[in-house]
Image (cartoon, grey):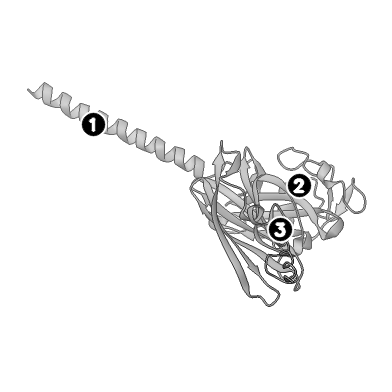
């Protein structure tokens, strides 16, 4: 009887141990998906006691992401590789660069945008190329400083107008998303068309790749049925970031020259993450449905003239 009781106790303990191991494995797997693995590490000088996170200086972002950065001269060789060894600064999308396309280029604090995120994450945009039309381009990275190292998790390229671009850190459950919003409609003059576009970058094998791009504000002027002159078509959209998808609620309001509302349309659509590599939209944008893909629909034809009075 004692032997049987002992075996039962040991069996129960073994089962509990296995269950605990399985649960621990699940938690560790979840942590790996939630906490990204760095692709680049750079040692940082310790400025405080043990356990205190390092503070990155402006030049640290440049030297971490672009090892060719010359701190004394304040220059970067645009033909050099990034910290992961990839040649991102020589892509064909940068052919419109102003000035020399190769060799060192002068950079300064005004060429870097650093946006803080949760848990010490930093979204860093280092602009090395000035392009026609006021745009700039350069490395876009997600990184953060730890106690003794600067860690880089993903690097990509971003092109936009620096004066109207803002970045944000989002999560789709365990997935990390970096969003870039080009505020093209901020401060727009009356009767001028505009659009504000949001680009969602996914982290894939150490790269920031654009997974979706859609308008969150858009204004256009054109004819509308029952309106003399041009009407204003305005789309506004509110993205909601949720588990493995982005839900976008779109609305278009058509107004006459006196800003009187003529009609309003609403649509909810979803960008679902497909194979962890891109988003697939559930339907086309309300803008395309209402305006026919970018151009305001033609005004309704004028009614035929009344028949001549009978004699």
Question: Where in the figure is residue 185, as x and y percent of width and height?
Answer: 71, 66
In this rendering, the answer to whether 199 lies above or below 86 is below
Write the residue at 62% across / 69% down: 262
Identify the residue position indicated by label 2 in the image.
66
In this rendering, the answer to whether 191 lies above or below 105 is below
Write the residue at 62% across / 39% down: 204
- Answer few, some or many: residues within 10 Å of disc 3's Cα (few below 14, many 20 plus, some between 14 and 19): some
Identify the residue position indicated by label 1 in the image.
13
Labels 2, 3: front one:
3
- Quadrant including the C terminus: bottom right
Write the residue at 50% across / 40% down: 32
Q: Residue furthest left?
A: 1
Question: Where in the figure is residue 236, as x and y percent of width and height?
Answer: 61, 63
Quadrant of the rendered image containing residue 153:
top right
Mark 1 and mark 3 in contact (Cβ < 8 Å)?
no
Camera-side residue of 232 and 39: 232
Lower sequence index among marks 1 and 2: 1
- Answer few, some or many: residues within 10 Å of disc 2's Cα (few below 14, many 20 plus, some between 14 and 19): many
Question: Where in the figure is residue 29, as x and y percent of width and height?
Answer: 45, 37
Identify the residue position indicated by label 3 in the image.
297
User: Label 2 vs label 3: CA separation?
Assistant: 49 Å
- Quadrant including the N terminus: top left
Which structural element holds mark 1?
helix
Horizontal side of residue 90 vs 185, given as left or right? right
Q: Residue furthest front?
A: 311
Lower sequence index among marks 2 and 3: 2
């Amino acid at each position: 009887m004692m032997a049987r009781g002992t075996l039962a106790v040991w069996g129960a303990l073994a089962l509990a141990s296995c269950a605990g191991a399985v649960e621990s494995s699940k938690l560790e797997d979840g942590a790996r998906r939630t906490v990204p693995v760095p692709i680049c590490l750079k040692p940082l000088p310790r400025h405080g006691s043990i356990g205190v996170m390092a503070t990155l200086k402006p030049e640290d972002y440049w030297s971490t992401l672009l090892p060719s950065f010359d701190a004394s001269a304040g220059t970067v060789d645009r033909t050099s590789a990034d910290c992961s060894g990839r040649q991102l600064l020589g892509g064909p999308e940068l052919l419109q660069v102003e000035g020399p396309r190769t060799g060192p280029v002068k950079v300064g604090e005004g060429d870097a945008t650093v946006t803080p995120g949760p848990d010490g994450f930093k979204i860093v945009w280092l602009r090395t190329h000035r392009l026609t039309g006021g745009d700039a381009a350069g490395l876009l990275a997600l990184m953060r400083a730890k106690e003794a190292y600067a860690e880089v998790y993903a690097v990509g390229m971003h092109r936009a107008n620096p004066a109207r671009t803002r970045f944000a850190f989002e999560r789709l459950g365990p997935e990390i998303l970096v969003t870039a919003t080009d505020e093209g409609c901020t401060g727009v003059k009356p009767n001028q068309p505009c659009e504000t576009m949001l680009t969602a970058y996914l982290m894939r094998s150490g790269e920031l790749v654009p997974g979706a791009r859609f308008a969150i504000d858009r204004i256009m002027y054109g004819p509308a049925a029952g309106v003399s002159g041009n009407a204003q078509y305005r789309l506004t959209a509110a993205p909601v970031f949720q588990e493995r998808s982005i839900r976008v609620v779109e609305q278009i309001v058509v107004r006459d020259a006196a800003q009187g509302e003529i009609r309003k349309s609403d649509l909810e659509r979803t960008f679902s993450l497909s194979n962890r590599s891109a988003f697939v939209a559930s339907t086309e944008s309300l803008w395309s449905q209402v305006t026919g893909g970018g151009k305001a629909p033609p005004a309704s034809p004028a009614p035929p003239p009344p028949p001549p009075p009978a004699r």
